[in-house]
Image (cartoon, grey):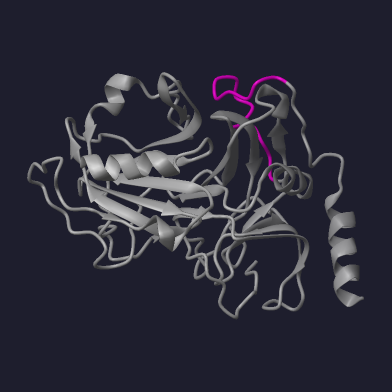
Amino acid sequence: MRNRLALALLVLSSSLPAVAIAQAPPITTSDGRIEKLKPGEYLWAPAIAPAGPVTVIVSLKTQKAYAYRNGVVIGVSTVSTGTRGYATPTGVFTVLQKDADHVSNLYKDAAMPFMQRLTWGGIAMHAGNLPGYPASHGCIRLPLAFAKLLFGITRMGVTVVITQDALVPVVVTSPGLLKPDSDAIPSTAPFVWTPSRSPSGPVSIVISGRDRRVVVLRNGIEIGSSPIVLDAPVDQTAAFTLQSIDADGEHWLRLSLPGDPRSGELSAEDRSKGHLPEGFRAGLATVLTPGATLLVTRETLASAGTGKAVTIIEAGNEPGNKGGGS
């Protein structure tokens, strides 16, 4: 009863007319609307892309969350992330759990409506107070109305990218997983491919330009890794979502990262610049479905360069702690 009362009070206190700004026109970076958003405000235009795979990118630097569907921005919201000492981790995550009526077991039964868990250690996206600056215990707080809208279009396993600098998210993984090799690698080079480790779920691919390495994860679990030969250096981080597969091949749509206006489909010429062992490429083709996410970063996957580990996909196995951390 106490939990439900706390939830009702949060819903009531958050339902202010000035908080939600619903917008029908396309959301672009050129008209200034995104920059003018005040704490608690958001833009929402789902009709621009009524169907397709969903990806969420959170920029800690700008304190905003961007929702993409079928490669198009359909929503932008102000957020409040972790304060000093409770920093929100950066990296690539998947939604591990959804609970519209969640309450925390870490912070005095705090109400966390429309919670979408990103780590079992207590990091999640959920509705909460937005004072205009980082103020949470690591979670990503959203306006109540936006949290509900986002909750309605996502599913388990949706990819969420959290970055400090929207143009260059640094992505690393567990020690020892990757062994950088700057030499040219033939198509017969050894690779790891174990799709049975995770038989189903959304697929995420991360490529490091510095390591010349690719890692494939399904439902948050690594199922393959391989060396990759790149014909050109990676000069800037880019993110893509697989829109469709047809007789002409795979159609990867670029996600316009905050501060990066590039858009459009990944061309066949660009795809041909990455060379994989034939067996690995064949295996990868068997698990790709619309909604898969591709992140290409110029940073190393073995080290963030700052001595701080950055998460790349939270393991799909649930430990005992079910707390949410805001």
> Where 91 sits versus 3, above or below?
above
Left or right: residue 134 compared with residue 236: right
Q: Position of residue 110 (x, y in %)?
A: 76, 71
Q: Position of residue 247 (x, y in %)?
A: 44, 20
Give the residue displayed 25% in from the left and 36% down from the top. 234
- Span highlighted in magenta in the image: 25-39
Q: Position of residue 179 (x, y in %)?
A: 18, 59
> Where 220 sits versus 233, above or below?
below
Count of labels in the image: 0
Residue 37 located within the stretch drawn in magenta: yes
Q: Quadrant of the N terminus?
A: bottom right
- Looking at this rendering, what residue extends furthest in the left direction? 183
> Where 55 sits versus 177, above or below?
above
Residue 21 located within the stretch drawn in magenta: no
The part of the image, by quadrant, that contains residue 53 is: top right
Give the residue displayed 53% in from the left and 70% down from the top. 317
